[in-house]
Each structure stands twice: as C-alpha cells, then as structure tokens.
Image: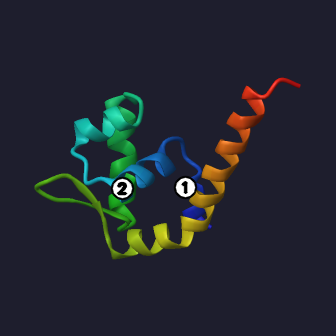
Amino acid sequence: MALFDLLGRRWTMRILWEVDVHQPTFRELQTLCGDMSSSVLNTRLSELKEVQLLTQGERGYALTALGRELMAKLAPLRQWAQTWDHQLQENQSTPS
C-alpha cells in the first residue's frame, strides 16, 4: 500500500488538492500551502512526480492522467470533508 504511505505524508494531500484546483508555480504552491518550507515542498513534489501523479510544465505543476484519476476517486472524501468542516464551524459558533 505504497500509495497510502505517500498520501499520509505531511502536506501531500494539500499539494494534490491545490494542484487539482490551480496550476500553481512552486512559489504559488508554497503560499497556497501556508508557506511550508521549500525543502519539504521540493521533497513532496519530487515524490509525486516520481509516482507519476504530478508533472511540471512551463506554467506550473499539474496533475497527470493518473493524478486526475486519483482525485476523481477522492472527490467524495473532499465533499465529506467540506461538509464536516462546515458542521464543525456551526457547532463552534453555537453556544452549548
């Protein structure tokens, strides 16, 4: 289950989410990910390129066909996470 190992590493999912929405350059991606260190970002990008989930073009990073397929499979998780986050925010703003 090498994929789960990779996806479980810090920042990996965030990078995939951001690249799925944008086609960011390195600096843009670093900013989108809360100014993570450049060494960590370089490592994660290298790992994702090595397993053919990301590619680097002239305009920035983009998902490969495999990356797009993975993100399509993860779409229900993204939707669930957004609903969960919304519910958490509602619960925190409502006095007990």
Indicate how the structure is coloured in the image.
Answer: rainbow
Say which amino acid is labelled 1.
Leu
Q: How crowded is mark 2: few (under 14 residues within 10 Å), some or many (20 or more)?
A: few
Q: How crowded is mark 1: few (under 14 residues within 10 Å), some or many (20 or more)?
A: some
Q: Quadrant of residue 51?
A: bottom left
Closer to us: 61 or 48: 61
**Mark 1 or 2, nearer chain start:** 1
What residue appears at the point 70 percent right and 48 percent down from the top-left corner? 84
Closer to us: 24 or 1: 24
Tell me residue 13's x, y (percent). 50, 51
Q: Residue furthest left?
A: 58
Q: Name the residue that disc number 1 marks.
A: 7
Say which amino acid is labelled 2.
Val
Position above or below: 34 against 53: above
Q: How far apart, in angstroms, are the residues tagged by discs 1 and 2?
A: 18 Å
What residue appears at the point 38 percent right and 65 percent down from the top-left corner? 53
- Residue 30 placement, left or right of 59: right
Residue 42 — which label?
none
- Residue 10 placement, left or right of 93: left
Tell me residue 28's x, y (percent). 26, 38
Q: Quadrant of residue 40?
A: top left
Q: Residue furthest right?
A: 96
Position above or below: 21 against 25: below
Q: Name the residue that disc number 2 marks.
A: 21
- Residue 36 placement, left or right of 96: left
What residue appears at the point 54 percent right and 72 percent down from the top-left corner? 73
